[in-house]
Amino acid sequence: MKIEEQITALRDELRQHNYNYYVLDNASISDYDFDIKLKELQALEKAHPEFYDADSPSLRVGGEVTKNFKTVPHTFRMYSLDNSYSKEDLEDWEVRVKKMVDGEVTYACELKYDGASMSLTYENGSLVRAVTRGDGYRGDNVTANVKTINSVPLKLKGDYPELFEIRGEIVLPFDGFNAMNEERIEAGEEPYRNPRNTASGSLKLQDSSEVARRPLDCLLYSLVGNKLPVKTQMESLKKASEWGFKVPPVAKLASSIDEVLSFINYWDVHRHDLPYETDGVVVKVNNLQQQEELGYTSKAPRWAMAYKFKAEQVSTVLEEITYQVGRTGAITPVANLQPVELAGTTVKRASLHNADQIEKLDIRVGDTVFVEKGGEIIPKIIGVNLELRPTDSQPTEYISHCPDCGTELVRNEGDAKHFCPNEEGCPTQIIGRIQHFISRKAMDIEGLGGETVALLVNEGLIKNYADLYTLSVADILPLERMAQKSAENLVDGVLKSKEIVFERVLFALGIRFVGETVAKKLAKHFKSIDALMAASFEQLIAVDEIGDRIAESVLDFFKIPTQDLFSEMPQGETHREVIERLRSYGLQLAISEEELAGQTDTLNGATFVVSGVFTKVTRTELKKLIETNGGKVSSSISKKTSYVVAGDNMGPSKRTKAEDLEVSIISEDDFLAMIDK
Ligand code: AMP
Ligand code: ZN
């Protein structure tokens, strides 16, 4: 085959798999095989730049950096929608519509997706422009970023018009949103508030490869252009879907407002089963000829009407505000509520985020507050019912001292949160850091749990994570409910953790903003803790994806404190001293020789789940082999799993799941053969 044909064939094939997975939600290839083919394409494209194609699926990974987003005019204005809240509102609207048009009126009912609105322009089947709504007349050109969103087709199929625009919504599904937040919390960062703002914020990121990593989705709902080959809204949805767009299949034709209402009532309940946020229904006059006759008011089409769902919301009494101290010292105010049923669960607590938020909403103890819960994990307080405010109510005074250790709190410029600066002496911080250190993704110390850590600290047996390595069975046996066996397991688990690879040790240290991914990057780049500790600000930010904030935090962590001559307080161990101790206990503070030597990318991109008992290697070794050969280890089987490595006694539920998802199950020997061992 000629090179050009080979490239075209690969592009077509990858485009089809991409479509199957992201638009149809029906995978036709494993992630692993997809990655192999993508790599093949990338290599060919690199060797043959003459066959460059702006629509190539290889461009999904991003890379283009936009410093300033250009504001561009919309060819067709992006209007807003009029809102309705009741049956009467909709009936009034129908009366107005019927006065203006002849003939029968039917309605296309769609969901109102809550994301960032977007206008995409296609020319000869290629995406040429993606523009945000902006003020409706002009928006920002975010094409490079939108191209990385997998469900946005770069090239269309079928009988599409030569030039047209299609509009829709960029959304961040709850799953992806919550996963992003878990990672942020783990790295000591403030979680994102809601999927919508995170979606629109993502579109304005400068580095498109960063956007590519965010699990954004794009749902389309309207065609715009001159002389389009469609007569009704329902038909345009059907066509758009045939051309390769992701058009949610829920749209329905209604022949009366009563039918519209049953659509609304159905989705008011079932929207909670959807993977992304919706905030209502959009009802559109189906006939495009009639739409044209109806035209627009100064801000919205007369032919469409949004119906806003009442947000799943309840009111309850705020009984108390308590303050939580995180392992990095960040203070989070928590609303303790009179328990109330909301979206199927009992809610007792809600996050109040920070002092500004409390002040902005003027939230006070004793207030009746409105609580809302979307698909996010944490319910939120969105307002106060002032009519029910008790007459003796007092404004909330934010705490000035740590609830745990009494130290005066600080708030750094630019930070939303207050911090307890008493890193060395604040019990919650001490315990939190050690709990983070032993957690599964960090040192994964078996036989030691979060409660035991608290007990060990409270009993004065340990002050920091390095002390774990000095514990003996005799030390811990006297602890409450500690049996000989569990004491031995604990000491054993601690001992075993000395084999944990450097990048995970680095993550375990708990440096602010250094989550799992950042730790990996730093470990790969600097190769040892010594090199990292010696790195300057410039050297740190020179690493791919390490920004100012992370660099500063790393420098701060390793800084040598100036001795305060006048202070009579004994200084605790510095981080550098703790690290020296860890070194003396034998922890991995550098990428090991074998890791360096054995590092391959044979398994690049493949995700493995390990299950059962193995004979030739231990589970830990097996996982290490996967990682040193470029693969990823995951704990649960999903569509994204490339292989399950099954040992003896693999759990039956895991097997069924793997079979259901058609994930290949391989033996220990198969695996070792794969990496040539
Ligand atoms: P609003 O921002 O409340 O004025 O509502 C108008 C916005 O709703 C539009 O700009 C779209 O971004 C959004 N929207 C979400 N789903 C739909 C839909 N199915 N049809 C039309 N607009 C929608
Ligand atoms: Zn404190």
Image: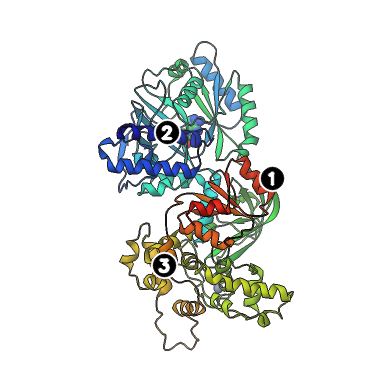
Tag 1: amino acid: Gly
Tell me which residue sits at (27%, 40%) in the image: 48
Lower sequence index among marks 2 and 3: 2
| Local secondary structure at mark 3 | helix
Q: Quadrant of residue 561?
A: bottom left
Observer-side mark, 1 or 2, equals 2
Residue 137 vertical position relative to residue 581 in the rendered view, above or below = above
Q: Which residue is mark 1?
A: 344
Image point (49%, 61%), residue name? 187
Comparing 357 with 268, the one in front is 268
Q: Amino acid at mark 2?
A: Glu
Q: How is the image coloured?
A: rainbow
In the rendered image, residue 467, in percent from the top left (x then y), is placed at 56, 79
Mark 1 packing: few (<14 Cα in 10 Å), some, or many (20+)? few
Residue 490 locus on image (x, y percent): 65, 73
User: Where is residue 472 drawn, in percent x and y?
Assistant: 63, 81
Front position among marks 2 and 3 = 2
Left of 66 or right of it: where is 670? right
Q: Is residue 571 above or below residue 343?
A: below
Q: Give the labeled residue for mark 3.
A: 553
Q: Is residue 98 above or below residue 405?
A: above
How many numbered marks does the figure carry? Answer: 3
At a point 49% along the width and 69% down the height, the residue shown is: 509
Label 2 residue near ligand 1, CB within 8 Å: no
How would you rate the neighbour count of disc 3 (Cα within 10 Å): few for under 14, some for 14-19, many for 20 or more?
some
Q: CA separation, marks 3 and 1?
A: 41 Å
Q: CA distance from mark 2 to mark 3?
A: 44 Å
Apparent side of residue 295 relative to residue 499 in the rendered image (left or right):
left
| Residue, disc 2 | 13
- In-image side of 356 versus 87 (left or right): left
